[in-house]
Image (cartoon, helix red, strand yellow):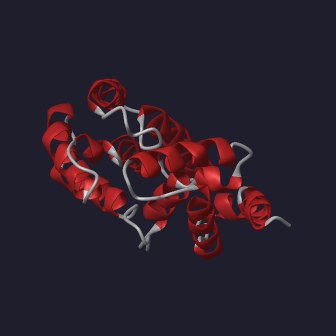
Amino acid sequence: MKQRYFDLKTAILNKLDKELPKQFYYHSYSHTVDMHDAAARIADYENISDDDKELVLVAALFHDAGFIINRDDHEMHSCNITKELLPSYNYTSEEIAIVCDIIMATKMPVSPKNKLEEIICDADLDYLGRDDFKEIGDLLFRELKEGGALQDLNEWNQVQIRFLTSHRYFTSFGKMNREDKKQENLRGLLGE
């Protein structure tokens, strides 16, 4: 990994830590770090080039930066922040365009168009197939409830059931390492 990446990582994580509104319990500094680490694991498993891995990891670091500006269209705002910051770290306009495409792939409903976009989509929802699914889901529930998007836990559980039922992993990593646990988490929600 090039030094520019490490310098950029420090800068954006500091920015997120200082500027993300505190009512984003899920879309937080911790989520960005978790998602970035998942993207690194998946990128290694998928055996992509070092240059492609760097672009995926940059996109992971910036994918929710737009929440600093607004919840609505946060992916677009994330791209605007990316376009603003990356040139000063010697990223080319072509690299920045790729990073923005990767970020935009996380917009729901996801429809990744290439391997890098598949990696970011799976990394963003990696927790669905992990043991910490409930703890992380509780953070999202709290964020959505306090934001007025949900009324109660029953409504949240129905949202989760619909989401997990329709969700699919795209990468070999996700299919091999997360799908079984995701199905177990879904069965738990269904009371099976």
Residue 175 or 192: which is nearer the viewer? 192
Measured as percent of width and height from the top left, residue 111 is found at 43, 74
Left or right, 12 with reference to 172 = left
Specify the quadrant of the image occupied by residue 14.
top left
The residue nearer to you, when weighing 21 against 128, is 21
Q: Give above or below for 33 relative to 152.
A: above
Where 33 falls versus 97 (above or below)? Answer: above
Q: Position of residue 71 (x, y in %)?
A: 28, 52
Q: Residue at x 64, y 55 (%)?
A: 128
Q: Which residue: 34% across, 24% down?
A: 10
Image quadrant in which you'd find residue 158: bottom right
> Where's residue 40, x and y in %?
54, 43
Does 13 sit above or below residue 95? above
Which one is in front, 116 or 21?
21
The residue that appears at 81% across and 64% down in the rendered structure is 191
The answer to which image quadrant residue 181 occupies is bottom right
